[in-house]
Image: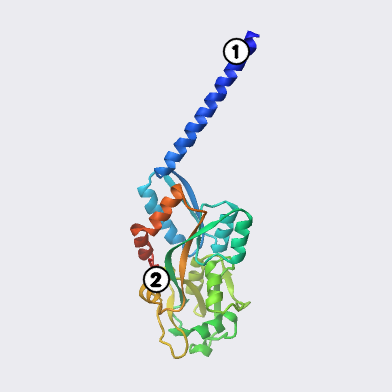
Amino acid sequence: MNNIRKSLTVLALACALFILLGCERHSTDEAATEKGVGYITVKGSDTMVHLLSTWAEDFMRSHPQAEVSITGGGSGTGIAALINGTTDLCATSRPMMEKETQLAAAKGVQPREFIVGRDGIAIIVNPQNPVTGLTMLQLKKIFTGAVTNWQEVGGQDRPILVFSRESSSGTYVFFQEHVLAKADYTQRARLLPGTSAVVQGVAADSGAIGYVGLGFAEHGEGIKTVLVAVDDEGRPVAPSEESVRSGDYPIARPLYLYTKGAPTGLVKEFLDFAMGVAGQKIVKETGYVPM
């Protein structure tokens, strides 16, 4: 009997110690999160990867015990990861679609939207291409396949090679909605997984055309930016911080971060940093338009 009592006493003490250590660990984790210690993931827009990476590097310098992991893959991929609970923050170059918010609600996820900057979509061609400006209608005809030769839009007699992002990209969706008026891309378009691939493709072929975020256009090598006019009577406008901010450049959009519900802990710290003075300075330095 004494042995049984001793065993029960030891078991009770072990359970108490386990609970105590668990509580202490929980409170320690909470305190660590409050002090910027922990690990967060950001996934989504390929357009925003360079901006996000620069944010992460700067944030981790001021939060030495924090780790921020950045992954691209496209806005749709990031939204899916947020809904499935495999990322803390989702970066997108378009707002969530109704079907995505419905799917999130069905899984008990309540996404919170934050606009963290703006971006202009630049039209790029090879430097050997003499075309310097296009209208929105000409762009629609080129990317839907109604126009297939540069001669039809004031260029040389050579076929047009269309480069586009793949369908999971927020830039793909935005361009389709705002430039193509929701029409389908030409079947001859080469769909590429990343913006850097579009830049490389255009740089390698004198008959190519593509679209990229403003930051990539300003820092890309072997490409030329084309001015864009709303219509035949409109003034051709170059994509820039000033033209995007003023609304003169017709192909511009907000950039978003989404969280699962109200942000807390390290996620909130990162979001506050991105939207604060230091973060918005990085937005400008990386070629985007601060809020």
Residue of label 1: 6
The quadrant the N terminus occupies is top right
Question: Please, what is the three-letter code of the amino acid marked with disc 1?
Answer: Lys
Residue located farthest toward the top when viewing the structure as drawn: 2
Q: Position of residue 52 (x, y in %)?
A: 44, 58
Lower sequence index among marks 1 and 2: 1
Residue 100 % position (x, y): 60, 62
Q: Secondary structure at mark 1?
A: helix
Q: How many marks?
A: 2
Q: Residue at x 51, y 71 (%)?
A: 201
Q: Which residue is at a point 56% across and 22% down the rendered structure image? A: 14
Which residue is at 39% across, 49% downward?
Answer: 60
Quadrant housing residue 220: bottom left
- Quadrant in which the C terminus is drawn: bottom left
- Image height check: is 291 above or below 66? below
What residue is pinned by disc 2? 218
User: Which of the two residues, 163 or 103, is positioned nearer the viewer here?
Assistant: 103
Coordinates of residue 143 in the picture (x, y in percent) = 56, 79
Whether residue 30 is visible here, answered yes or no, is yes
Q: Nearer the viewer, residue 18 or 156?
A: 18
Cα separation, mark 1 vs mark 2, equals 75 Å
Q: Nearer the viewer, residue 40 or 133?
A: 40
- 139 above or below 219? below
* Among the 4 quarters of the image, the one containing residue 75: bottom right
With 281 as the anchor, is 90 left or right in this view? right
Residue closest to the far right = 1
142 left or right of 34 in image: right
